[in-house]
């Protein structure tokens, strides 16, 4: 899949920033690929890009209209349809990270055909996956895992890739979600893979490699989330990580969109090791990535220090602090 650039990011009228995490992630890591954002009345998210209508975006050179949102069920609301069709009529391709196939909506399919434009379903893959084998593969792998969904696993993985490269390691980000695919240009949205093939897809994402290469696999969901634990477990088994980093958001009182209590960081460490040993007996935790976006600087610093002391592991907010402490621990653990 090859997306034409630059992008116009469509946010619709989503209720909060988390719902626009795809667009926000693209801006954070590939801002130079974007000309602006398009929002409908009532939208509560903002990427910080200039607001544009379709004419302004076309004049700025936009090539692909990216539906940069996530929602329950991955559906396209009816009242967004006119905007998508208008983008096609304006000469843009359309790319979506939603679960639905754009071609399955007649108005969109017709508009794409009459304008000769491409439709990209980032969650869909033409790759055929086998079931996971669990056979040990050459190379090293790191997986980000979470106490909940939407806590910063992608950001942590991307920051770790950069931090590891800065430290002289051969590190490569492996995308498992739609935003990661937009950012990296390769990968698969693991939550759209048929359940029997999730671990096989994870093996495909992180294949045999040079012995000293680190593949940094983007985590999904949480082993404790009743909606997504199956995806998280298949990804854990298939990626067979040597190391993992726990990602945690400090203000959650229960898991997102359900009434399930939030597990402790130690719960996540213990269960990840227990389950991960099936395909990699040497799995170990090398750090904790703490999402402190809702805290002031002083509170964030004290919270991170408390977490580090409680678990005997380096803890950082990748955005505020960088990931040097975790990379240093990784190098110590694996004699790099």
Image (cartoon, grey):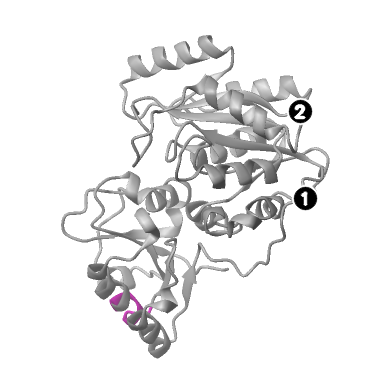
In this view, 36 is above or below 80: above
Q: Quadrant of residue 327?
A: top right
Q: Is residue 69 visible?
A: no
> Which quadrant of the structure image shows residue 270?
top right
**Against 278, is 39 above or below?**
below
| Residue 195 located left or right of residue 206 | left
Q: Secondary structure at mark 1?
A: loop
Camera-near label (1 vs 2) is 1
Q: Which residue is mark 2?
A: 282
x and y percentages locating residue 31 in the rendered image: 42, 52
Q: Residue at x 23, y 57 (%)?
A: 13
- Neighbor class of circle 1 (other Cα within 10 Å; few <14, some 14-19, many 20+) is few
Taking 145 as reference, is 79 left or right?
left
User: Disc 1 marks which residue?
Assistant: 133
Q: Earlier in the sequence, mark 1 or mark 2?
A: 1
Q: Residue at x 38, y 58 (%)?
A: 73
Residue 260 drawn in magenta: no
Which labelled disc corresponds to residue 72?
none
Asked if residue 89 is among those painted magenta in the image, a careful observer would answer yes
Secondary structure beneath label 2:
loop
Q: Position of residue 95 (x, y in %)?
A: 44, 67
Check the picture and name the quadrant holding the C terminus.
top right
Q: Residue at x 57, y 18 (%)?
A: 314
Q: Is residue 107 above or below residue 332?
A: below
Task: Write the residue at 58% across / 29% down.
Answer: 245
Taking 288 as reference, is 64 left or right?
left
The residues colored magenta run: 86-91
Quadrant where the N terminus is found in the figure = bottom right
What is the C-alpha distance between the residues marked 1 and 2?
Answer: 18 Å
- Callout 2: 10 Å neighbours few (<14), some, many (20+)? few
Q: Residue furthest bottom?
A: 114
Q: Nearer the viewer, residue 304 or 61?
A: 304
């Amino acid at each position: 899949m090859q997306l034409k650039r630059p992008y116009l990011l469509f946010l619709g009228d989503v209720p909060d920033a988390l719902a626009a995490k795809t667009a926000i992630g693209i801006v954070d890591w590939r801002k130079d690929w974007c000309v602006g954002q398009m929002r409908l009345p009532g939208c509560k998210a903002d990427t910080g890009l200039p607001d544009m209508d379709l004419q302004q975006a076309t004049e700025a050179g936009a090539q692909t209209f990216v539906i940069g949102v996530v929602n329950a069920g991955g559906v396209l609301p009816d009242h967004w349809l006119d905007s998508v069709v208008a983008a096609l009529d304006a000469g843009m391709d359309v790319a979506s990270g939603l679960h639905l196939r754009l071609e399955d909506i007649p108005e969109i399919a017709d508009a794409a055909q009459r304008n000769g434009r491409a439709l990209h379903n980032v969650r869909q893959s033409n790759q055929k996956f086998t079931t996971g084998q669990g056979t040990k593969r050459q190379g090293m792998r790191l997986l980000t895992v979470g106490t909940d969904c939407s806590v910063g696993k992608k950001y942590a993985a991307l920051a770790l890739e950069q931090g590891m490269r800065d430290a002289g390691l051969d590190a490569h980000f492996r995308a498992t979600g739609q935003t990661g695919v937009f950012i990296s240009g390769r990968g698969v949205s693991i939550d759209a893979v048929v359940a029997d093939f999730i671990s096989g897809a994870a093996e495909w994402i992180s294949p045999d490699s040079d012995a000293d290469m680190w593949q940094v696999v983007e985590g999904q969901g949480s082993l404790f989330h009743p909606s997504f634990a199956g995806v998280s477990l298949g990804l854990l088994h298939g990626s067979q990580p040597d190391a993992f980093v726990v990602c945690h958001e400090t203000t959650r009182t229960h898991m997102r969109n359900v009434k399930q209590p939030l597990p402790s960081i130690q719960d996540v460490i213990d269960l990840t090791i227990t389950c991960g040993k099936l395909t990699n007996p040497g799995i170990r935790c090398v750090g904790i990535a703490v999402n402190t976006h809702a805290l002031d600087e002083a509170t964030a610093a004290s919270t991170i220090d408390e977490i580090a002391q409680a678990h005997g592991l380096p803890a950082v907010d990748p955005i505020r602090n960088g990931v040097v402490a975790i990379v240093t621990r990784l190098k110590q653990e694996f004699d790099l």
